[in-house]
């Protein structure tokens, strides 16, 4: 009898401990240093630390899933992932289909070219090939301001699934310039033989996204963000990845 009691108690405790800490699947696109990238086979970066610190503060677990940036919103909508964190800009169109946390970072778009080239901002006009990552705000900016405005031809806009591919295309001469988020452009310019020749002041804010209507989760994330700012942990993370 005693044995049965202790077995059921253990089972109960097990169920309770599993029940307490829910695991959320977090989608990212790990080609965006210093926000998310792969190092020694692990997903690391500012966003990765940010979401795991929020999770710790709010008492949930996270499991990271890497995917292409343009799959993140469909994956949230279909429930394949619970949270998306990927240096994702809060835009009006995206806000119609997912819910965003409070902003946690600000960015513009930068234009990068090969370090040894003589290109300036005028690379964006005329017969040059421009690389972007599919579905990003860089893609939207080039599509709206250059393509639709008639400054570049359709076949001069090259869309890549990953920034790593667009960077490779730049390095091997398949494109003349790449338009991408300013903090990431600056990081690539430190890591690879590329340089920033212009900044497009798009004034973007990054948010963490969840499925539309999941207010419980978004409240937890916002609460976590507030607590990290108040405790100074946010500044520590900024120092760690942006070295201020
Ligand atoms: N901030 C940009 C966007 O939201 C790019 C994000 C990314 O490529 N990870 O579209």
Image: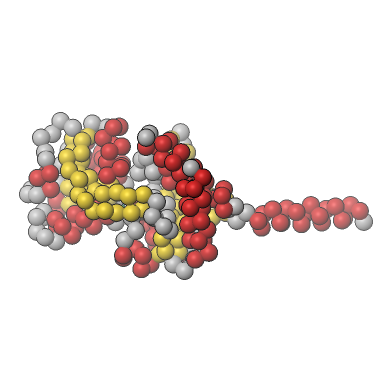
- Residue sitting at 15 percent across and 30 percent down? 116
Q: How is the image coloured?
A: secondary structure
Between 96 and 2, the one lying in front of the other is 96
Whether residue 104 sits left or right of residue 115 in the image: it is right
Q: In terms of depth relative to the viewer, which is nearer, 224 or 163?
A: 224
**Tag count:** 0
Is residue 94 positioned above or below 136 on the image?
Answer: below
Residue at x 12%, y 48% (from the top left corner): 124
| Side of 153 relative to 234 (left or right) | left
Location of the N terminus by quadrant is bottom right
Please give the name of the residue rendered at 20% of the width and 45% of the height, measured from the top-left corner. 199
Inspect this view and state whether residue 81 appears. Answer: no
> Furthest residue to the front?
230
Q: Residue at x 30, y 42 (%)?
A: 183
Residue pushed farthest left? 126
Q: Vertical placement of 95 versus 87: above or below?
A: below
In the image, residue 157 lies at what x, y percent? 17, 52
> Quadrant of the image for the C terminus?
top left
Q: Is residue 127 left or right of residue 70?
A: left
Give the side of residue 160 with respect to residue 217, left or right.
Answer: left
Relative image position of residue 128 (x, y in whole percent): 11, 46
| Residue 96 seen in the figure | yes
Q: Does 93 appear above or below 165?
A: below
Residue 63 place in picture, x, y as percent: 52, 49
Estimate the x, y position of residue 36 in percent, counting from the top left: 40, 43
């Amino acid at each position: 009898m005693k044995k049965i009691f202790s077995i059921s108690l253990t089972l109960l405790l097990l169920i309770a401990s599993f029940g307490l800490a829910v695991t959320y699947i977090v989608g990212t696109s790990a080609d965006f240093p210093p926000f998310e990238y792969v190092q020694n086979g692990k997903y690391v970066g500012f966003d990765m630390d940010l979401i795991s610190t929020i999770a710790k503060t709010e008492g949930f677990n996270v499991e990271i899933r890497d995917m292409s940036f343009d799959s993140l919103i469909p994956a949230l909508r279909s429930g394949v992932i619970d949270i998306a964190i990927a240096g994702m800009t809060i835009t009006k169109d995206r806000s119609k289909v997912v819910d965003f946390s409070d902003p946690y970072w600000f960015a513009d778009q930068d234009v990068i070219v090969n370090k040894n080239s003589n290109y300036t901002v005028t690379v964006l006009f005329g017969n040059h090939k421009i690389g972007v990552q599919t579905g990003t705000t860089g893609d939207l900016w080039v599509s709206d301001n250059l393509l639709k405005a008639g400054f570049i031809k359709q076949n001069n806009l090259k869309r890549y699934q990953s920034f790593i591919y667009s960077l490779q295309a730049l390095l091997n001469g398949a494109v003349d310039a790449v338009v991408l988020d300013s903090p990431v452009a600056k990081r690539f310019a430190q890591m690879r033989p590329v340089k920033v020749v212009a900044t497009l002041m798009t004034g973007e804010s990054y948010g963490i996204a969840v499925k539309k209507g999941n207010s419980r989760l978004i409240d937890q994330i916002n609460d976590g963000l507030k607590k990290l700012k108040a405790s100074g942990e946010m500044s520590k993370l900024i120092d760690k990845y942006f070295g201020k």
